[in-house]
Image (tube, rainbow, N blue to C red):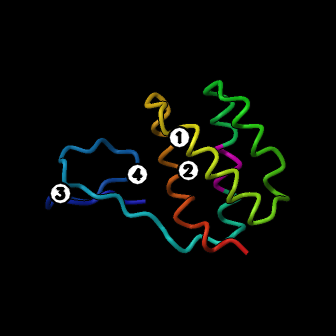
Amino acid sequence: MIVSGGGQRDKPFGAPLSEENETLRWPTNLDHKTIVLRLVPLRTELEAAGLHELAARFSGVEGMTGGQIGAAVIGALTLLQHKPEHNAIAKQFEMIAVNLKNLK
């Protein structure tokens, strides 16, 4: 992913943002397989952050239906919305959420 804005040269995802008006371009065409491929390492990140119950929601994500994945992602966002210390993880779920319409 690329972060752009304010006439600066593009920076890789995760680079510090130096201007308030910078935007983050997220892919909106991720398919089921690609969403799962993003959730598997995210599950590991949840475990490392001590969010074991949340990580458990994604146990077996490789075999989940689109509806099950959608429910788990929205549930994760709901739980993380008031936890600013996990903002980086929440942003990853937000990116996946904009792609839920592609799950089949």
User: Which numbered disc flags the more N-terminal residue, 4 or 2?
Assistant: 4
Name which residue type carries label 1.
Ile
Which label number is shown at residue 93? 2
Which label number is shown at residue 23? none
Q: Which residue is mark 4?
A: 13
User: Which numbered disc flags the more N-terminal residue, 3 or 2?
Assistant: 3
Majority secondary structure of magenta residues: helix
Q: Which residue is mark 1?
A: 89
Q: For the point 50% across and 71% down, which residue is it? A: 28
Query: Which range is magenta?
Result: 38-42
Q: For the point 70% across and 50% down, which residue is it? A: 72
Q: Which residue is mark 3?
A: 8
Cα distance in 3D space between marks 1 and 2: 7 Å
Q: For the point 47% across and 33% down, which residue is it? A: 82
Cα distance in 3D space between marks 3 and 2: 27 Å
Q: Is residue 61 left or right of residue 6?
A: right
Q: For the point 46% across and 28% down, which residue is it? A: 85
